[in-house]
Image (cartoon, grey):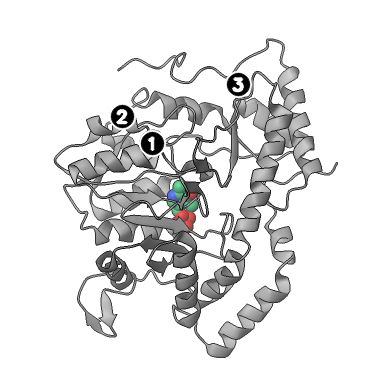
């Protein structure tokens, strides 16, 4: 078999090429390039899809998180709780409001915010909580929301990897006070460039985000707030309308492929498979396993033409950008161990079952060639760096 790419957007777009070209032409014809009717229609469609009253389209997922926090009034001196095992943007958005990120470690099986650790992280300065729906599965929202409500703290969902995922039959993004999405090209719902959205049921928050993304104006050249330029391109609004219609089918295909991976890798002792929480539907933005000797396995797979990814090799609290914050190795052992062991296998709707079988076999071969049979260690129990409690 020829090589298996980590992602194949070309194949994804070939199937809808004619529709995309017609959308470009419609936007050209209307000259509606920055915001405008194509974006407004997408906002209606996406709010309906998520089951929220409002959707405000913005320039990226990072913008969505940042403006959601600003709309809640988060600023200097405040603290915002999130997880260290996420993409850097979650923490950047907090930092850019002037607030301080406060980290809570993740659950060892689902890789999302551990509700049991949440209460201890809350202080009088806590102004928001951002659970991250990592890899496409929502965080355990019910206990998180219960604790947040008890303390009167708003919840902002980072749903940038979880378009269409559900938790107890309600979609990701519709649980918190605000839900943030990214339409970066590789996401389950991806634009042909950058894009993002904030969804909410709160009219005041929706209109504040809408003003903030457009220089703080509700009426042209009348600026009630100091905002920013975070508008969505018209072309992305048109493209996303087309791609939204295929999101559910794409997620179904991902779930079928995930089942195939599970079956093929079930009895491989050294592979830790993703766990789907009862009552939630994983959207499998990524299919992430944990393996011993991860970096070498990644290289060996690439040599065999199987291209994998790592999401993420360095947890946010250990990033160089935050080196002067006093965070150190050992503070968040589950995140740190996951960062050392996670391996993202190819996962996209266009992936063929034969390719999944090829990937699984290649992974088995790489693992079985190792002289000492190794098992991915139980997270948190054997980490050599757990020095504090
Ligand atoms: C992609 C992503 C973001 C940022 O989205 P952009 O559109 O790239 O700005 C934020 N959080 C998570 C978890 C993401 O995966």
The answer to whether residue 152 is above or below residue 177 is above
Q: Position of residue 193 (x, y in %)?
A: 55, 65
Q: Nearer the viewer, mark 1 or mark 3?
A: 1
Q: Name the image quarter holding residue 243.
A: bottom right
The answer to whether residue 124 is above or below residue 25 is above
Could you say which disc has been placed on residue 117 in the image?
Answer: 2
Could you say which disc has been placed on residue 113 in the image?
Answer: 1
Could you say which disc has been placed on residue 299 in the image?
Answer: none
The residue at the point 58 percent across, 89 percent down is 29
Q: Position of residue 200 (x, y in %)?
A: 35, 61
Left or right of 296 in this view: 90: left
Q: Position of residue 16 (x, y in %)?
A: 71, 69
Cα gap from disc 1 to disc 3, whole angstroms: 23 Å
The residue at the point 73 percent across, 48 percent down is 351
Residue lying at the far right in this picture: please name it: 1
Q: Nearer the viewer, mark 2 or mark 3?
A: 2
Disc 2 element:
helix
The answer to whether residue 278 is above or below residue 224 is above
Cα gap from disc 2 to disc 3, whole angstroms: 27 Å
Could you say which disc has been placed on residue 292 in the image?
Answer: 3
Check contact, mark 1 vs mark 2: CB within 8 A.
yes
Q: Name the image quarter holding residue 70.
A: bottom left
Q: Nearer the viewer, residue 374 or 207?
A: 207
């Amino acid at each position: 078999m020829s090589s298996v790419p980590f992602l194949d957007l070309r194949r994804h777009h070939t199937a809808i090429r004619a529709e995309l070209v017609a959308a470009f032409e419609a936007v050209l014809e209307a000259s509606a390039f920055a915001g405008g009717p194509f974006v407004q229609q997408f906002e209606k469609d996406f709010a309906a899809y998520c089951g929220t009253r409002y959707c405000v389209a913005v320039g990226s997922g990072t913008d969505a998180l940042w403006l959601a926090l600003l709309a809640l009034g988060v600023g200097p001196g405040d603290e915002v709780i999130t997880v260290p095992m996420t993409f850097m943007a979650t923490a950047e958005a907090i930092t850019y409001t002037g607030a301080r990120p406060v980290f809570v470690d993740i659950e060892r099986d689902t890789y999302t915010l551990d509700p049991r650790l949440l209460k201890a992280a809350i202080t009088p300065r806590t102004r928001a909580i951002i659970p991250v729906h990592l890899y496409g599965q929502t965080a355990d929202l019910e206990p998180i929301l219960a604790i947040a409500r008890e303390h009167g703290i708003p919840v902002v969902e980072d749903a940038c990897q979880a378009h269409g995922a559900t938790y107890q039959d309600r979609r990701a993004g519709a649980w918190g006070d605000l839900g943030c999405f990214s339409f970066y090209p590789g996401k389950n719902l991806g634009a042909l460039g950058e894009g993002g959205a904030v969804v909410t049921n709160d009219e005041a928050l929706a209109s504040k985000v809408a003003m903030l993304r457009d220089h703080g104006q509700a009426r042209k050249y009348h600026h009630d707030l100091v905002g920013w330029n975070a508008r969505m391109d018209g072309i992305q609004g048109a493209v996303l309308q087309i791609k939204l219609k295929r999101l559910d089918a794409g997620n179904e295909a991902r779930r079928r492929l995930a089942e195939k991976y599970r079956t093929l890798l079930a009895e491989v002792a050294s592979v830790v498979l993703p766990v789907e929480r009862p009552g939630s539907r994983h959207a499998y933005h990524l299919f992430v396993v944990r393996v011993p000797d991860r970096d070498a396995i990644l290289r060996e797979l690439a040599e065999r033409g199987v291209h994998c990814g790592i999401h993420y090799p360095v947890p946010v609290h250990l990033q160089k950008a935050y080196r002067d914050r006093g965070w150190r190795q050992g503070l968040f052992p589950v995140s740190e161990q996951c960062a050392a062991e996670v391996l993202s296998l190819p996962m996209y709707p266009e992936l063929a079952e034969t390719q999944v079988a090829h990937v699984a076999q290649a992974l088995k071969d790489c693992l079985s060639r190792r002289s000492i049979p190794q098992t991915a260690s139980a997270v948190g129990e054997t980490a050599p760096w757990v020095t504090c409690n």
